[in-house]
């Protein structure tokens, strides 16, 4: 039977051993990253004291591999075969990898189960071999049964540069089920707010990209790349709770956020006073009246064609920009957009002074001469038709065709509006459609009023002179609108 004194000695010995192990293997060593590791062995020959082939290899490796190192550990060992220890180790590697004599070189890299012989082959193949080894390790790491495939809720937004990087990172991980949710979609925007509430995400971290995994979340590109693999290994993905989105009726009750309806309406109204648009309507109405055709019915039909066309152009360009996935939040893209907007504003200011001097031939921001001639020809041909039943649908079509041509003149403000709507968190859903309808209605409102005035007996010449006298003011307003768009993009995006 062990005596009490002996028991105390045994306990003291065990305690001392634990202290020794703790000091020998500190906590930092015991808590190493669980990320998979790629091992690279580099052999070279160097007899020059001032040369540094090891630094050159590391620089080359970083240049070739770049962001592919994310989410994985890399261990590089380098050996100079000019030294006996390096030469002996290389012989061992040559035998282990069964390297043929004609492939043996003084400069070699061993990675995974492959070898690269000579500087040229290293430069050509190192990146591909690294990616192959990394993908293999990731697949081994995440080899799970179908019932336990990792399921992640990943929120992003179109045009976010960090989201693009996270997208590429997620694509490099095999055998995971990633549900990608674009918060440009109003339903997903409401859904992410519910996740923020359920996971108690602090306001300063309520942004995209963000991943909800298990009972935790990873906010931002850095956190996702550094911690996602570890979270998956820990198994937290097995209990990611689904949260149902709010129903459509509730979504539509949410207030319009970002670039509001009043801003869209005001912008459309300003653009509707553009001389490019007004001049074509006046020419169309003047030809109709010369042929004793009532301007009201055909004028409204012509305007309806323009309204529908502008609405369709808005949805078309919105979808194109969304598909292109342009990183609007990227500082360089923002700078280019702001520069373009300010250049257009300067051209409008230049036109302002030309209009004040009545030098209308020097006005640059207007429909090109060849397009004006084409539009005039179309209008003259159409108005030669005497039958109202034929003239009405053709007037609608003419309005649509002329709108497409006028887009070169009136489209700059509209495109800026589309981009602003796109980046205010809207997809091509109910709210975005409402924005384009509001813009279109505001855009054609001046045209409707002009048509009514002419129908009531106002002379077209008087309206033309009225527009000409106010062209400097219109150009000033256009310049201010473009400057405001530039400020909005700089401050809020």
Image (cartoon, rainbow, N blue to C red):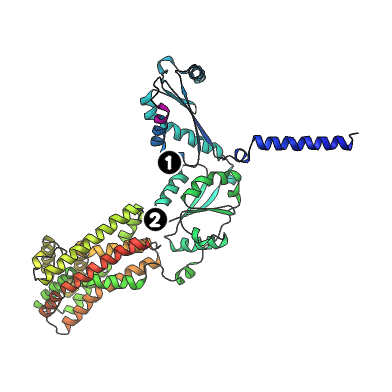
Residue 456, placed above or below residue 487: below
369 on left or right of 181: left
Which comes before the other along the chain, label 2 or label 1? 1
The question of residue 290 being in magenta is answered with no
Please tell me which residue is depicted at 46% across the width and 39% down the height of the picture.
Answer: 69
Position of residue 315 measured from the top left corner of the image (x, y, whole percent): 32, 62
Res. 314 in view: no
Indicate whether 92 appears above or below 269.
above
Using the image as rendered, state which of residue 31 and residue 97 is in the foreground. 31
Helix, strand or loop at label 2? It is loop
50 in magenta: yes
Which label was assigned to residue 158?
Answer: 2
Q: Nearer the viewer, residue 355 or 392?
A: 355
Tell me the magenta residue range. Answer: 46-56
| Residue at the farthest front position | 49
Main secondary structure type of the part rendered in magenta? loop
Label 2 crowd (10 A; few <14 / some 14-19 / many >=20): many
Question: Which residue is drawn at the image coordinates 24% and 61% (left, top)?
Answer: 342
**For discs 2 and 1, the disc positioned in front in the rendered view:** 1
Displayed quadrant of residue 197: bottom right
Q: Residue 369 at x, y = what percent? A: 11, 62
Residue at figure coordinates x 35%, y 56% from the top left: 328
Q: Residue at x 48, y 64 (%)?
A: 190
Q: In 3D space, how far apart are the residues under numbered discs 2 and 1 (Cα atoms)?
A: 21 Å
Locate residue 437 relative to residue 154 in the image: left or right.
left
Quarter of the image with the C terminus in it: bottom left
Res. 67 mark: 1
- Give the image location of residue 101, x and y in percent: 43, 14
């Amino acid at each position: 039977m062990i005596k009490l004194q002996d028991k105390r000695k045994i306990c003291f010995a065990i305690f001392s051993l634990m202290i020794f192990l703790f000091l020998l293997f500190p906590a930092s060593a015991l808590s190493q990253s669980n990320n998979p590791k790629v091992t690279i062995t580099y052999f070279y020959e160097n007899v020059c004291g001032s040369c540094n082939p090891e630094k050159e290899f590391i620089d080359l490796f970083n240049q070739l591999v770049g962001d592919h190192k994310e989410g994985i550990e890399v261990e590089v060992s380098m050996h100079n075969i000019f030294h006996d220890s390096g030469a002996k180790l290389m012989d061992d590697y040559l035998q282990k990898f069964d390297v043929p004599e004609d492939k043996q070189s003084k400069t070699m890299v061993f990675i995974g189960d492959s070898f690269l012989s000579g500087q040229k082959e290293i430069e050509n193949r190192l990146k591909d071999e690294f990616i192959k080894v990394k993908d293999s390790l990731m697949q081994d790491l995440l080899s799970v049964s179908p019932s336990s495939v990792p399921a992640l809720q990943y929120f992003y937004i179109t045009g976010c540069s960090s989201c693009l990087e996270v997208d590429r990172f997620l694509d490099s991980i095999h055998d995971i089920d990633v549900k990608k949710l674009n918060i440009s979609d109003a339903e997903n925007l409401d859904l992410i707010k519910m996740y923020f509430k359920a996971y108690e995400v602090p306001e300063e971290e309520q942004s995209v990209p963000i991943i909800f995994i298990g009972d935790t979340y990873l906010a931002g590109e850095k956190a996702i790349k550094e911690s996602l693999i570890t979270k998956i290994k820990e198994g937290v993905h097995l209990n990611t709770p689904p949260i149902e989105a709010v129903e459509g009726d509730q979504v539509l009750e949410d207030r319009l956020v970002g670039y509001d309806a009043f801003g869209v309406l005001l912008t459309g109204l300003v653009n509707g006073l553009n001389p490019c648009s007004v001049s074509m309507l006046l020419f169309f109405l003047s030809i109709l009246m010369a042929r004793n055709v009532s301007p009201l019915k055909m004028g409204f039909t012509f305007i309806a064609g323009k309204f529908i066309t502008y609405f369709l152009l808005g949805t078309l360009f919105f979808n194109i920009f969304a598909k292109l996935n342009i990183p609007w939040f990227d500082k360089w893209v923002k700078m280019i957009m702001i520069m373009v907007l300010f250049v257009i504003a300067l051209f409008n200011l230049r036109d302002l002074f030309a209009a004040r001097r009545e030098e209308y031939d020097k006005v640059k921001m207007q429909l090109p001469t060849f397009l004006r001639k084409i539009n005039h020809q179309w209008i003259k041909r159409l108005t030669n038709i005497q039958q109202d039943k034929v003239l009405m649908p053709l007037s609608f079509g003419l309005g649509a065709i002329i709108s497409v041509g006028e887009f070169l003149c009136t489209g700059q403000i509209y495109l800026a509006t589309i981009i602003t709507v796109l980046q205010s968190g809207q997809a091509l859903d109910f709210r975005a459609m409402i924005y384009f309808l509001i813009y279109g209605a505001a855009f054609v409102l001046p045209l409707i009023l002009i048509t009514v005035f002419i129908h009531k007996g106002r002379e077209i010449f008087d309206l033309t002179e009225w527009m000409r006298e106010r062209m400097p003011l219109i150009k000033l307003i256009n310049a201010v609108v473009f400057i405001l768009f530039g400020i909005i993009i700089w401050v809020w995006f």
